[in-house]
Image (cartoon, rainbow, N blue to C red):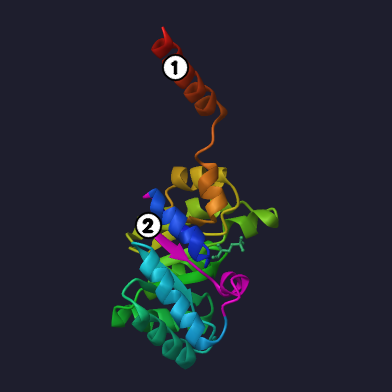
Amino acid sequence: MKFFIDTANLKDIREAQDLGILDGVTTNPSLMAKQKISGKDRVMQHYKAICDSVDGDVSAEVIATTFHEIIAEGEELAEIDDKIVVKVPMIKDGIKAINYFSEKGIKTNCTLIFSAGQALLAAKAGATYVSPFIGRLDDISVDGIALIEQIALIYRNYSYSTQILAASIRHPMHIIQCAEVGADVMTGPLSVINALFSHPLTDLGLAKFLADHKEAAVK
Ligand code: G3P
């Protein structure tokens, strides 16, 4: 399973990249706003800086919501760098735009996916990635992981090449469960990726190994 980091924070992206386990970055307008990135030039420069910081795909979301505007904005974003994946919302004009981008060879990520039917439409349009938001489903007492499993079954049945990018990851068990049910990619914040490292027995075991080594050296 590929690991993407879900942030527009360059420090976090570089820290995850340095770990050697990062495969890409996802952003959205809320994450860009959190970094106080606004205005077209600054937004474009920031995407370029993200692309320069990671070996892998970088999802950049359009703000436009009508077909022609999505096309114009997406084409501009795609020109920033080969790593850019144009992130498009799951609306009718978005699906039409994904179909257009797919024919042009521009990578896409269909976002705000909350049902298997939406994921099926995105695959039919030729999306490179589809982003089901599992945490936001869990928030309203709907099983987000079950949706990933359902989409994986449907894509397998028809050999769709669209990759399932599990988004809105809230805790390390989400990552494990995504891997169990066959998500192609998970995207989460650095804190959740870092949480995978932790186990008290690892800490205790390492402390004991180092103490025994020190004691043997003294004897
Ligand atoms: O990138 C979209 C998604 O990961 C959002 O996550 O935590 O705002 O639901 P969250």
Mark 2 Cα-neighbour bin, 10 Å: few <14, some 14–19, many ≥20: many
Mark 1, Cα crowd under 10 Å, few <14 / some 14-19 / many 20+, is few
Foreground tag (1 vs 2): 1
Relative placement, left or right, of 28 versus 213 is right
Q: Which residue lies furthest to the top in this view?
A: 219
- Magenta span of residues: 20-37
Q: Nearer the viewer, residue 21 or 12?
A: 12
Q: Mark 1 points at which residue?
A: 214
Instruction: Find residue 57 and report its horizontal and vertical position in percent.
Output: 37, 66
Label 1 or label 2, whichever comes before in sequence order: 2
Above or below for 17 versus 128: above
Q: State the residue at coordinates (44%, 80%).
A: 45
**Residue 31, x across and y down, in percent:** 58, 69
Looking at this rendering, what residue extends furthest in the front direction? 218
Can residue 86 be seen at all in this image of the molecule? no
Q: Does the magenta stretch include residue 36?
A: yes
Amino acid type of the residue tagged 2 in the rendering: Asp
Residue 5 in the image: state x and y as whole percent: 48, 58
Picture quarter containing residue 140? bottom right
In the figure, 40 relative to 185: above or below?
below
Q: Residue at x 57, y 75 (%)?
A: 29
